[in-house]
Image (cartoon, rainbow, N blue to C red):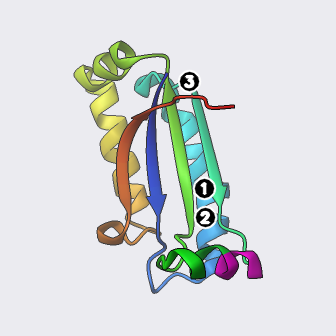
Amino acid sequence: MIKFVYVVRRRPDVSPDAFRKYWLESHGPFVRKHAQALRAKRYVQSHTIHTPFNAMAQRPRGTAAPYDGITELWWDGMKDLVIAGMTAKGREANRLLAEDEARFCDLPNCSVFFTEEHTIF
């Protein structure tokens, strides 16, 4: 499977609670609505939890503060991803999703990329 990974930061003018609520209750259903046009098979949101374990994991690695979460969107293979990008409905869905993301995400400080999984255990 091919996976689109979207590492998300909220806009500074959006509170953490408002960000999580909009992402889960508005944007999530919006993605579901466009899943067929995107030919996507699975969509998962992973919301960052606030715990002392974050600092314990960051400190020895010298990493930056955590992102607000991660979105993962799956396709059965590259063929489905390419086909979705070639259709008017797929391109429109992608445009509408990016437009909606701008409402709650700090887009210049987010990161997006495609991956292929390699299961280790």
Amino acid marked by disc 2: Tyr
The segment highlighted magenta reads: 51-56
Quadrant of the rendered image containing residue 2: top left
Residue drawn at the location 43% of the way across and 67% of the way down: 103
Viewer-nearest of labels 3 and 1? 3
Mark 2 neighbour density, 10 Å: few (under 14) some (14–19) many (20 or more): some
Give the residue type that dot 1 points to. Ser
Q: Real-space Cα distance between discs 3 and 1? A: 19 Å
Residue 79 in the figure: left or right of residue 4: left
Question: Which numbered disc, 2 or 3, marks the residue that appears first in the sequence?
Answer: 2
Q: Secondary structure at mark 2?
A: helix
Q: Position of residue 98 (x, y in %)?
A: 35, 52
Image point 59% across, 37% down: which residue? 43
Q: Where does residue 107 sit, x and y in percent of width and height? A: 34, 66
Front residue of 33/117: it is 117
Disc 3 secondary structure class = loop
Q: Quadrant of the C terminus?
A: top right
Examine the image and state in which quarter residue 70 appears: bottom right
Q: Disc 2 designates what residue?
A: 22
Left or right? Give the position of 82 relative to 80.
left
Residue picked out by circle 1? 26
Answer whether residue 51 is visible to the viewer in this image: no
User: Dot 3 corresponds to which residue?
Assistant: 41
Could you give the CA–CA distance between mark 2 and mark 3, rounded to whole angstroms?
22 Å
Where is residue 60? Give x, y as percent. Answer: 58, 78
Query: At 59% across and 60% down in the image, what residue appears?
Result: 23
Q: Nearer the viewer, residue 53 or 79?
A: 53
Tell me the SS state at disc 1. Answer: helix
Q: Position of residue 12 (x, y in %)?
A: 45, 85
